[in-house]
Amino acid sequence: MNTKIRKVGNSYAVTVPKELADELALEEGAEVVIVREDDTLVIRPAESRWERFTNRARLRAEEAGITEADIEAAMREIRGR
C-alpha cells in the first residue's frame, strides 16, 4: 500500500490506511514502534494483538464491575468443577 508522509509541526507523520489499521486492530492513539532496517522503516504495534485484546477485555470487565474471582468462578462452572 502506498501512503504519503506529511509534515506535522517539526516532525513527519505517516498515514496508515484504514484497511490496514483495521487488520492490525490499531486505533487512534495506539502506540507503535518504528525501527530502521537498512533503508527500510518498519512500523509495528507496540503491543501484540493478544495484549491489546486482553487489555481491552480487562478494562471492560473493570467497567462492568467483574472481578478476577468472578471470572475464575465462571470458568470453574463452565468446566463443571
Image (cartoon, grey):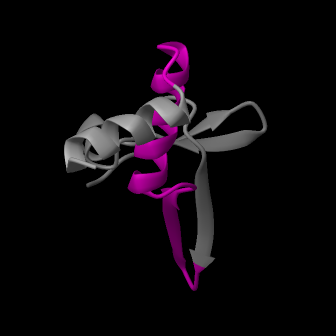
Q: Nearer the viewer, residue 70 or 28?
A: 70
Identify which residue is drawn at 54% across, 28% down: 67
Along the line of sight, the residue nearer the viewer: 78 or 28:
78
Closer to the camera, 9 or 32? 32
Relative to 59, does residue 37 appear above or below in the rendering? below
Residue furthest to the top in view is 64
Return the x and y of residue 26 as percentages of the image width and height.
41, 40
For residue 49, side relative to residue 45 (left or right): left
Q: Position of residue 15 (x, y in %)?
A: 44, 40
Q: Quadrant of the N terminus?
A: bottom left
Return the residue found at the far front: 81
Q: Position of residue 36 (x, y in %)?
A: 61, 74
Q: Residue furthest right?
A: 10
Is the residue 46 above or below the residue 22 in the image?
A: below
Residue 27 visible to an observer of this rendering: no
Residue 50 magenta-drawn? yes
Percent across and percent down for residue 2 are 30, 53
Which residue: 55% across, 22% down? 62
How many numbered marks appear?
0
Instruction: Tell me which residue sits at (22%, 50%) in the image.
Output: 79
The part of the chain drawn in magenta is: 37-66
Question: Residue at coordinates 50% horizontally, 60% vertically from top-left?
Answer: 43
Residue 48 appears in view: yes
Question: Going by the image, does 48 lie left or right of 21?
Answer: right
Q: Is 24 included in the stretch rendered in magenta? A: no
Give whichever of 4, 22 is nearer the camera: 22
